[in-house]
Amino acid sequence: MAANTSPIYVLTPNDDWNTVITAANTAKDGTGTVVLAFTAGANGAYVSHLKLRAIGTNTASVCRVWINNGSTNATAANNTLYTEVTLPATTLSEVAAQPDILVPFGFGLDAGFKINLTLGTAVAAGYIPTVIGGDY
């Protein structure tokens, strides 16, 4: 096989951290209110992982991770549910660390594709998402 015999590396880091996610979105098709966590560059991108970090006291919830084809998320056909991750209840503390919730990716995204996030239930303090990746 002659195709793809040379490794490809990212050209520019694309590490995104965005606004805090607190609002519920019970739509199961990626529509509605979403938090944009990552956008692939003009030549596509490699995404290593997503980290969710509670920033205070929250009730338990679920985070749904969507891959969007770069078009409006208001059209369900533009979204696919990549995975769901359970978010435990958290309590603000000055003596104990909040848990990091890691979501592995380890694959490339086409140019302009996005990673969107939703929560199953509203939470008080919220979670801050951090995506580690790079653009080709």
Image (cartoon, rainbow, N blue to C red):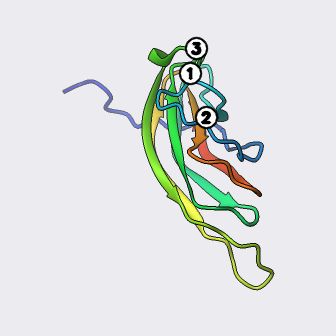
Along the horizontal axis of the image, is 106 left or right of 57?
left
Q: Is residue 37 above or below residue 98?
A: above
103 and 135: which one is in front? 103
| Dot in front, 1 or 3 | 3
Q: Residue furthest right?
A: 94
Q: Amino acid at mark 3?
A: Ser
Residue at numbered disc 1: 43
Q: Position of residue 87 (x, y in %)?
A: 55, 59
41 and 91: which one is in front? 91
- The reply to whether discs 1 and 2 touch (Cβ–Cβ < 8 Å) is yes
Residue at numbered disc 2: 11
Residue under the point 31% across and 32% down:
5
Residue at numbered disc 3: 71
Q: Secondary structure at mark 2?
A: loop
| Cα distance between the residues tagged 2 and 3 | 24 Å
Q: Residues within 10 Å of mark 1 (few under 14, many from 20)?
A: few
Q: Is residue 99 above or below residue 85?
A: below
Q: Residue furthest left?
A: 1
Along the horizontal axis of the image, is 92 left or right of 42?
right
Q: Secondary structure at mark 3?
A: loop
